[in-house]
């Protein structure tokens, strides 16, 4: 029973976070493509043909985005170092939540009962679980929302 609840909560939290990560990635793609080509059709083509997920990693997009910001909008880059740091953290969390397995052993059930925490693990017998408390998940989601709002505003400039 509790294992099922853990899996449902993990799926809900992961889904919400990974969706936010995808939005962040698309906003970075848009910023990069529009920098090089202000024609909307060609910007979309640049995203589809060059910047898409099959060709360029999240990390490469993040690096290119930050370099463009630093080079062409230095004042925005300087005042946004905290949010850029959050962007790097979001990438790390995205990779963890996308690739680690939810732990549903007795320890995970006990901790879930106690405080709602969820554990993710790479290899059950060989690695320590990575625990996510409710507060930690709220913080990660909030950081992702802050980045989405910032990127949305930045794309309006």
Image (spheres, helix red, strand yellow):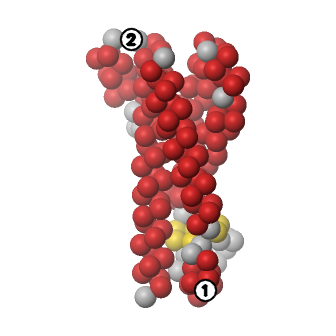
Q: Position of residue 11 (x, y in %)?
A: 43, 66
Q: Is residue 59 above or below residue 45?
A: below
> On the rendered structure, is 41 left or right of 58?
left
Q: Which residue appears at 46% of the width and 30% of the height?
A: 152
Q: Is residue 126 above or below residue 89?
A: below
> On the rendered structure, is 18 left or right of 86?
left
Q: Residues within 10 Å of mark 2 (few under 14, many from 20)?
A: few
**Camera-nearest residue between 133 and 119:** 133
Q: Is residue 85 above or below residue 139?
A: above
**Camera-nearest residue between 23 and 129:** 23
Q: Quadrant of residue 8?
A: bottom left
Find disc 2 in the rendering and name its residue.
38
Q: Secondary structure at mark 1?
A: helix
**Residue 67 visible, this angle:** no
Q: Which residue appears at 67% of the width and 16% of the height?
A: 75
Q: Quadrant of residue 34?
A: top left
Q: Position of residue 37 (x, y in %)?
A: 40, 12
- Quick one: quadrant of the N terminus? bottom left
> On the rendered structure, is 3 left or right of 89?
left
């Amino acid at each position: 029973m509790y294992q099922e609840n853990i899996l449902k909560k993990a799926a809900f939290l992961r889904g919400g976070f990974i969706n936010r990560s995808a939005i962040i990635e698309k906003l970075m793609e848009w910023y990069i493509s529009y920098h090089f080509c202000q024609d909307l059709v060609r910007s979309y083509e640049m995203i589809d043909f060059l910047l898409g997920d099959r060709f360029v990693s999240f990390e490469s997009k993040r690096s290119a985005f930050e370099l463009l910001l630093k080079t062409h909008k230095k004042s925005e880059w300087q005042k946004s170092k905290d949010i850029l740091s959050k962007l790097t953290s979001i990438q790390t969390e995205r990779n963890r939540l996308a690739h680690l397995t939810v732990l549903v052993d007795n320890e995970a059930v006990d901790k879930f009962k106690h405080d709602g925490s969820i554990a993710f693990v790479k290899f059950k017998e060989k690695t320590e679980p990575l625990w996510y408390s409710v507060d930690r998940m709220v913080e990660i989601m909030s950081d992702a929302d802050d980045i989405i709002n910032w990127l949305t505003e930045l794309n309006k400039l």
